Image: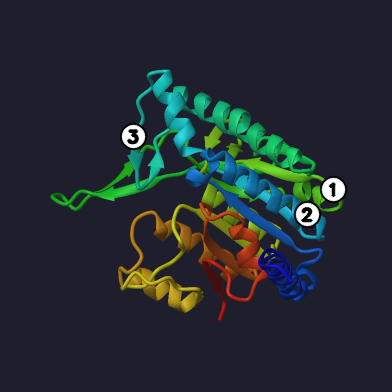
Amino acid sequence: MSGSRIGETKHWLRTAATLAEALPYLRRFSGKTFVIKYGGHAMGDARLTESFANDVVLIKQVGINPVVVHGGGPQIAEMLERFKIKSSFVDGLRVTDEDSVEIVEMVLSGRINKHIVTSINAAGGHAIGLSGKDGPLIEARKLTRTKRDPDSNIEKVLDLGFVGEPTRINANVLNIFAESDLIPVVAPIGIGAGGETFNINADTVAGAVAQALAAAKLVMLTDVAGVVDGDGSLLSRITLSEGRALIAKGVITGGMIPKLETCLAAVEANTEAAHILDGRVPHTLLLEVFTKHGTGTMIEAG
């Protein structure tokens, strides 16, 4: 047998072994719901977008119900700059005034949402785009933040404008898609009691949706490998208590804190497990969910 023939045989044997390894997971999660938060720089990479779309379509084809929630920070910043609208941040949240919220809604519910929908459809799926206003899917209220003045020790309320937090997720809207071949793609825009438009953090929306649907998994696609310990080593699996300890000890810092807190809250409620994955790795979603070793960090009750 020639060297090329041997190499080809080894390749197919590895493929067959991977499929065999995935089978128990496919059986276990058939009919279950996965909420997938899609964001970060992977959204701007055509190759990674295609890989993500293929993974979502495959998950749907094997009987799992994916719900995609997307962000769009870099794209929003680009559009605000184009319109010469200045923006600032408080605790990682974009202060969103009346002018900004119109741009945010246009970018999230329009340009980004439809790009993801088109990509999934091109991969052979049947995606449909939604914002929190549709249904209505996401009812929200104004989010408030406080800051203590170091000199006077007086706590001041910070005005973030039209930044919101979910008060109710209408699970019935998304459950309809679970009974069909449609894949919902959700823009993190909420609607207030008075009809106001609210810009909501996509991680927060994904966590709220996962809880409302009692999802089997909440998957966060990010720009990092996962949760790391004090030495910078990747933690492939942590429990709720271990996750809280990492935050309390200051091992987890910056933008990873709210991501991990969202995952902890979802698992503490009714989500079987949460995953923080590097969205820059092709097919990271399939590798994490359907192989023994995975690629990122899984958070479970313990």
Q: Residue furthest right?
A: 180
Look at the numbered discs 3 and 1 and tell me whether their residues touch, using CB distance below 8 Å.
no
CA distance separating discs 3 and 2: 39 Å
Q: Residues within 10 Å of mark 3 (few under 14, many from 20)?
A: few
Of marks 3 and 2, which one's residue comes earlier in the chain? 2
Q: Quadrant of residue 218?
A: bottom right
Look at the numbered discs 2 and 1 and tell me whether their residues touch, using CB distance below 8 Å.
yes
Instruction: Check disc 1 and give the amino acid type.
Output: Asp
Instruction: Check disc 2 and give the amino acid type.
Output: Lys
As rendered, which of 33 and 22 lies closer to the eye? 22
Q: Is residue 45 above or below residue 211?
A: above
Residue carrying label 3 = 88
- Estimate the x, y position of residue 45 in percent, counting from the top left: 53, 40
Residue carrying label 2 = 60
- Residue 181 tag number: 1
The residue drawn where x is 35% and y is 47% is 91
CA distance separating discs 2 and 1: 8 Å
CA distance separating discs 3 and 1: 41 Å
